[in-house]
Image (cartoon, rainbow, N blue to C red):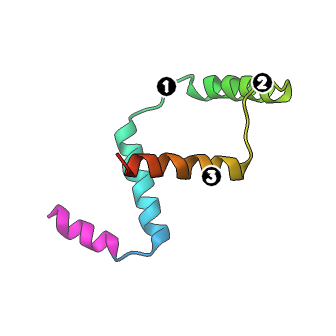
Amino acid sequence: MATDVLADILRLPPEERARLARELIRSLDGEPEADATQTWDVEIGRRGAEVDANAADTMTLEAYRAHIRQRRTSRANR
């Protein structure tokens, strides 16, 4: 039965499949902690302050992409 449902889902447009995937993942996560939003707001503020104070290690988008390519290559060669 699950394979029939999966076959139906795979025939949907990409946007609908993505929406269903999000909903399935949310169903596995359970209820968020009551203070999760506040905790993330504090963490985002802390990280932003580090960047503003030049205390964070940062990289350009192109450097990040090169880093990811290098990691993928090294994992593929293991």
Spatial distance from mark 3 to mark 2, Cα to Cα? 22 Å
Q: How many other residues sit within 10 Å of disc 3, few (<14), some (14-19) or many (≥20)? A: few
Of the residues under marks 3 and 2, which one precedes in the sequence? 2
Which secondary structure dominates the residues rendered in magenta? Answer: helix
Please report contact status of discs 3 and 1: CB closer than 8 Å, yes or no. no
Q: Quadrant of the C terminus?
A: top left
**Circles 1 and 2 in contact, beta carbons < 8 Å:** no
Q: Position of residue 19 (x, y in %)?
A: 46, 60
**Mark 2 secondary-structure assignment:** helix
In contact (CB < 8 Å): disc 3 and disc 2:
no
Numbered label attached to residue 33: 1
Q: Is residue 19 above or below residue 27?
A: below
| Above/below status of 34 relative to 30 | above
Specify which label sits upstream in the sequence, 1 or 2.
Answer: 1
Image disc number at residue 65: 3
In screen coordinates, is 72 left or right of 59? left
Name the residue at 74% across, 27% down: 56
Residue 36 in picture, x, y percent from top left: 56, 26
Camera-nearest label, 1 or 2: 2
Point 26% across, 66% down: residue: 6
Quick one: label 3 or label 1, which is nearer the N terminus? 1
Place residue 3 in its image quadrant: bottom left
Label 2: how many Cα within 10 Å (few below 14, some 14–19, many 20+): few
Magenta stretch encompasses residue 40: no
Q: What numbered label is drawn on residue 50?
A: 2
Q: CA distance from mark 1 to mark 2?
A: 26 Å
* Amino acid of disc 1: Glu
Magenta range is: 1-10
Q: CA distance from mark 3 to mark 1?
A: 33 Å
Indicate the amino acid at tag 2. Answer: Glu
Q: Nearer the viewer, mark 3 or mark 2?
A: 3
Q: Quadrant of the N terminus?
A: bottom left
